[in-house]
Amino acid sequence: ERYNMKIWNVWDHGRWAFVKRVTFDYMTNYFMESILSCVSVENKNVLELGAGTGRLGYLALANKAKKITLIDSSQKAIKLSQQLFQTVAPNRFSVIYSDLFGYSPDEKYDLVFSAGLIEHFKGKERLRIIQKHVELTSQDCLIIHPADTLYAKFFDNNPLSWMLYGYQKSFSDQEINSYLKNIQPEISFIHKRFYPFYTVPFLHNKEWINKYLDNKFCGKLGGAIITHIKV
């Protein structure tokens, strides 16, 4: 079962339930920088799974993506995304209210990505989500997820964290490697650590310390991992 969807629906009752207007914080811009360091979005049809507020998708358009499609199963998230994109030309974006497992478009996308999605699922559903990324793309997938750090484990097991941000469980490179090998043994992928204070919410906007530590330790301390899958 999807624990967060059944019990801790944070979009309706947690942290994001109180958001009235979408703003762009430092972490969002940092994530987009990391995405662009892996793959260009220029002139590509891009899909974001579990898009939430749609901020990353909006930044993809700002970086010359041809079109962005956003999918989320929360009506609150969909409403926020629609507000954010209200000044964007309708032919450049789609906002779809759907369970991501049931989404089956006619054509594949050039790039499929997610951020802060798969850690909110348990067991075999993690494998299914990664499979869905691969199934929906003709070229590249990018999955941003928390690294298996000591603080992340504390965050994972804190009931207050569940109430504010939903159930989540960080995982190691080895775990995601095993999922990818089950999907397609010859698949090509790399992991890149970045953003030291992912899962430390009160430090998300501290630009100087995040950039300093990432530069100082070359991403080795990263609390986030971006996994780049080439199909």
Image: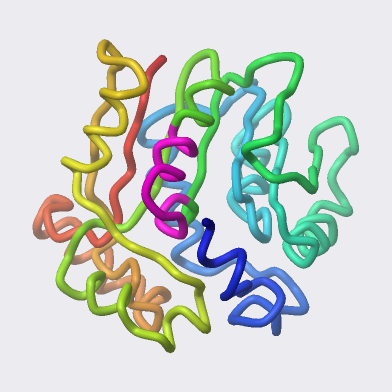
Front-most of 88 and 117? 117
Residue 158, quarter of the rendered image: bottom left
Residue drawn where x is 50% and y is 59% of the image:
28
> In the picture shown, does residue 29 fall above or below 66?
below
Count how many numbered circles sit on residues in the image: 0
- x, y percent for residue 82: 83, 55
Residue drawn where x is 19% and y is 50% of the image:
172
- x, y percent for residue 122: 41, 54
Front-most of 213 and 104? 104
Figure coloring: rainbow
Residue drawn where x is 38% and y is 19% of the image:
230
- x, y percent for residue 95: 80, 44
Q: Could you tell whether 62 is left or right of 135 in the image?
A: right
Q: Could you tell whether 226 is left or right of 6 in the image?
A: left
Name the quadrant of the C terminus: top left
Decide whether residue 133 is among the magenta residues: no
- x, y percent for residue 168: 40, 66
> In the picture shown, does residue 155 fall above or below 121?
below
Residue drawn where x is 40% and y is 56% of the image:
119
Give the residues drawn in magenta, as a range. Answer: 118-130
Q: Main secondary structure of the magenta part?
A: helix
Decide whether residue 124 is among the magenta residues: yes
Q: Residue furthest front?
A: 1
> In the picture shown, does residue 134 fall above or below 146?
above
